[in-house]
């Protein structure tokens, strides 16, 4: 199901996606219902969790991803509900399939109500494309953004019992990625999609330029550094976004603390309070809900 597709998401999460597919295929009934929108006062909160897919599939049914069709259905309800004055998209997603993302981002941009993307966990690749379409991006001190680029996943070779012959004048219809010529064809397709991705982001967020995006080299920026880079507008919390609290702007101390790997200090500076993390060595934790779910599905921690 997942091969011969183009994805915009980090490699680690893409590899986990393939491992999880086999686990889910062996299960009979969904154990976790897909997340749905809720209303806080006059604000609609639309969750964007897990891997993004164009339509519902086994991953979204088991709560490991989000279908763009479901996001659009929730947008339609929020837009037509006169009681809703603002729409917040709560992100914790590594990205996903490229199909439908460009159109979905344009749809979000055209919403006639104020929109805010809140990144409490991750908004990478395709997920960041959607976040960039909002009027404002607010991130937690540990929010992860970036991974701007395209990954192609192709099935190399074919079933030995199957004979496939391509017409003489259409060799690029089935490019062989194991050959230099076939790889060139596939690379061109991916680069063309990346160019659309980058130009779309430049149009959606004036703070980003083509040179700045390319300078990221597909990497991820976190919290204060993401704000400094222009990937987000400020630091804050979901409750702060809902209440309309002003954003925190990171200073040089925060970004310097991140550069040195002093996450406790960076967190304290970002939130204005002393945390346990500031008093103890940083721990390598999985702070994303979908990450924990994937780990459980594949039987590991």
Image: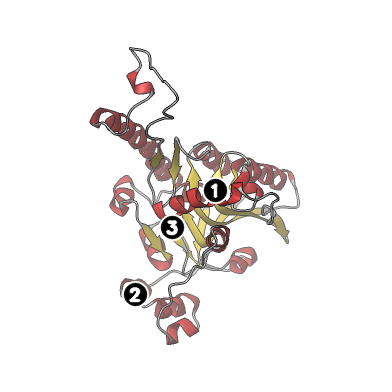
Side of 135 relative to 160 (left or right): right
For image coordinates 37% across by 32% down, the residue present is: 157
Residue 292 picture quarter: bottom right
**In the rendered structure, which disc, 1 or 3, sits on the residue that comes first in sequence?**
1
Residue at the farthest left position? 180
Say above or below: 270 vs 87.
below
For image coordinates 58% across by 54% down, the residue present is: 49
SS state under label 2: loop
**Percent x, y of residue 300:** 52, 64
Instruction: Estimate the spatial distance between the alpha carbons at disc 1 and disc 3, rounded to whole Å.
Output: 28 Å
Residue 193 picture quarter: top left
Is residue 279 visible in the rendered image? The answer is: yes
Residue 80 picture quarter: top right
Instruction: Estimate the spatial distance between the alpha carbons at disc 2 and disc 3, rounded to whole Å.
Output: 17 Å
**In the rendered structure, which disc, 2 or 1, sits on the residue that comes first in sequence?**
1
Label 2, residues with CA under 10 Å away: few <14, some 14-19, many ≥20: few
SS state under label 3: strand
Q: Nearer the viewer, mark 1 or mark 3?
A: 1
Tag 1 residue: 22
In this view of the protein, which residue sits in the foreground, 7 or 257?
7
Tag 3 residue: 145
Tag 2 residue: 261
Say above or below: 281 vs 214.
below
For image coordinates 41% across by 20% down, the residue present is: 164
Residue at the farthest bottom position? 279
Side of 209 relative to 137 (left or right): left
Label 3, residues with CA under 10 Å away: few <14, some 14-19, many ≥20: many
């Amino acid at each position: 199901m997942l091969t011969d597709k183009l994805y915009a998401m980090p490699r680690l999460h893409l590899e986990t996606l393939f491992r999880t597919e086999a686990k889910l295929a062996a299960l009979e009934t969904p154990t976790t219902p897909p997340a749905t929108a809720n209303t806080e006062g006059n604000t609609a909160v639309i969750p964007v969790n897990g891997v993004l897919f164009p339509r519902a599939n086994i991953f979204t049914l088991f709560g490991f991803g989000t279908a763009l069709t479901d996001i659009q259905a929730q947008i339609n309800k929020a837009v037509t509900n006169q009681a809703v004055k603002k729409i917040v998209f709560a992100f914790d997603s590594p990205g996903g399939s490229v199909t439908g993302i460009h159109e979905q981002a344009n749809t979000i941009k055209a919403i006639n109500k104020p929109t805010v993307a809140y990144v409490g966990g991750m908004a990478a690749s395709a997920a960041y494309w959607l976040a960039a379409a909002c009027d404002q991006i607010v991130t937690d001190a540990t929010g992860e953004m970036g991974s701007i680029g395209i990954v192609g996943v192709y099935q190399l070779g074919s079933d030995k019992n199957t004979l496939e012959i391509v017409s003489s004048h259409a060799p690029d219809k089935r490019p062989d990625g194991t050959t230099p010529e076939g790889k060139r064809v596939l690379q061109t397709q991916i680069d063309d999609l990346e160019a659309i991705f980058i130009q779309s982001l430049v149009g959606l967020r004036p703070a980003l330029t083509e040179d700045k995006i390319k300078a990221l080299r597909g990497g991820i920026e976190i919290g204060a550094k993401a704000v400094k880079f222009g990937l987000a507008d400020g630091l804050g919390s979901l409750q702060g976004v809902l209440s309309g609290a002003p954003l925190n702007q990171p200073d040089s101390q925060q970004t310097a603390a991140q550069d040195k790997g002093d996450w406790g200090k960076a967190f304290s500076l970002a939130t204005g309070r002393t945390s346990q993390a500031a008093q103890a060595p940083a721990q390598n934790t999985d702070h994303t809900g979908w990450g924990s779910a994937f780990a459980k599905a594949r039987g590991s921690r």
